[in-house]
């Protein structure tokens, strides 16, 4: 795959009407982010899981030139990355099995960040994958990672408990030379998300801020070097008000997702007549 447009990409068509809808949707989200960010730079990750690569290309080629896209499944991310320009910066934001970490880090050179690191084993596997890739080609930067924190205490949620965050972050910093710890991430409880208003604070977002305070203090990191990744379609504005540096928005941009069994990595778009 080249640094520009791949051979597969040149044959991929974008529906102009679909592209217009996507651009309007993401422009609305960007305006909302700007209105609550108070001049801070907040990164928007367009969460494209179960949506075709054509949608991603439409946004990447638009005047907005969106580059940050998030995926929940390692195989889907890897397939889409092989079809799309290297200039896209991919984020792995979903729960990641340990055995998927090394192949993902090794096979996708423009994997920009893995946001769901919640164990030493996963960090080590990502390190092995990136080290293997570094032996085959020059890498201009380390693979960014975020430690995922389970701030809600829900058993079904991934993430380390806040009390274990320092140990995980310390391991990444000291034992994983091809990785760069850039932040902490949480996916909070839905009930807390729905209950948050401009006047109230979301407990999960408070917990992530407090966890960062503990990590930067104990490990001697500058607060500005450890971002907060929190906020999704339903609560990204509240998250930004509470200090989020990165939000993940999917359905607000791309619309409702199909069932996984019905999803297409690449859609067939009819040629304009």
Image (spheres, rainbow, N blue to C red):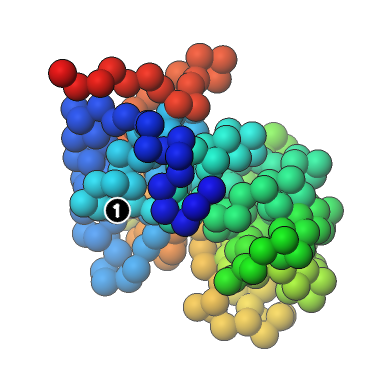
Q: Is label 1 in a helix, a strand or a loop?
A: loop
Q: Is residue 212 visible?
A: no
Q: For residue 136, what is the image quadrant?
A: bottom right
Q: For residue 179, what is the image quadrant?
A: bottom right
Residue at image point 24% right, 34% down: 19
In-image side of 50 versus 59 (left or right): right
Residue 216 horizontal/vertical position (percent): 63, 78
Residue 171 horizontal/vertical position (percent): 80, 69
**Quadrant of the rendering where the C terminus is positioned:** top left
Q: Is residue 176 above or below residue 31?
A: below
Residue at image point 31% right, 43% down: 59
- All told, the count of numbered labels is 1
- Residue most extreme to the top: 262
Q: Is residue 246 visible?
A: yes
- Residue most extreme to the left: 273
- Residue most extreme to the front: 7
Q: For residue 253, what is the image quadrant?
A: top left
Residue at image point 29% right, 46% down: 61
In-image side of 52 versus 97 (left or right): left
- Mark 1, Cα crowd under 10 Å, few <14 / some 14-19 / many 20+, is few
Most foreground residue, 21 or 42? 21
In-image side of 155 versus 262 (left or right): right
Q: Is residue 93 above or below residue 155?
A: below
Most foreground residue, 204 or 23? 23
Query: What residue sits right under mark 1 in the picture?
Result: 65
Residue at image point 51% right, 57% down: 229
Residue 165 horizontal/vertical position (percent): 72, 63
């Amino acid at each position: 795959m080249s640094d520009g447009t791949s051979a597969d990409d040149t044959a991929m068509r974008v529906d102009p009407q679909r592209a217009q809808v996507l651009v309007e949707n993401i422009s609305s989200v960007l305006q909302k982010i700007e209105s609550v960010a108070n001049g801070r730079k907040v990164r928007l990750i367009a969460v494209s899981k179960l949506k075709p690569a054509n949608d991603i290309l439409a946004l990447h080629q638009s005047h907005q030139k969106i580059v940050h896209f998030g995926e929940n499944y390692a195989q889907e991310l890897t397939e889409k990355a092989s079809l799309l320009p290297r200039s896209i910066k991919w984020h792995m934001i979903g729960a990641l099995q340990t055995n998927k970490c090394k192949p993902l880090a090794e096979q996708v050179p423009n994997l920009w960040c893995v946001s769901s690191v919640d164990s030493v084993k996963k960090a080590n596997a990502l390190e092995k994958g990136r080290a293997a890739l570094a032996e085959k080609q020059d890498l201009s930067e380390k693979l960014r990672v975020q430690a995922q924190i389970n701030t809600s205490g829900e058993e079904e949620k991934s993430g380390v408990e806040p009390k274990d965050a320092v140990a995980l972050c310390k391991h990444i910093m000291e034992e994983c030379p091809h990785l760069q710890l850039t932040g902490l991430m949480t996916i909070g409880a839905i009930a807390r998300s729905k209950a948050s208003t401009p006047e109230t604070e979301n407990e999960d977002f408070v917990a992530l801020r407090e966890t960062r305070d503990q990590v930067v203090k104990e490990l001697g990191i500058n607060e500005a070097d450890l971002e907060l990744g929190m906020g999704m379609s339903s609560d990204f504005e509240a998250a930004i008000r509470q200090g989020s540096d990165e939000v993940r928005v999917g359905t607000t941009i791309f619309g409702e997702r199909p069932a996984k069994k019905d999803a297409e990595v690449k859609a067939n778009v009819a040629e304009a007549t």
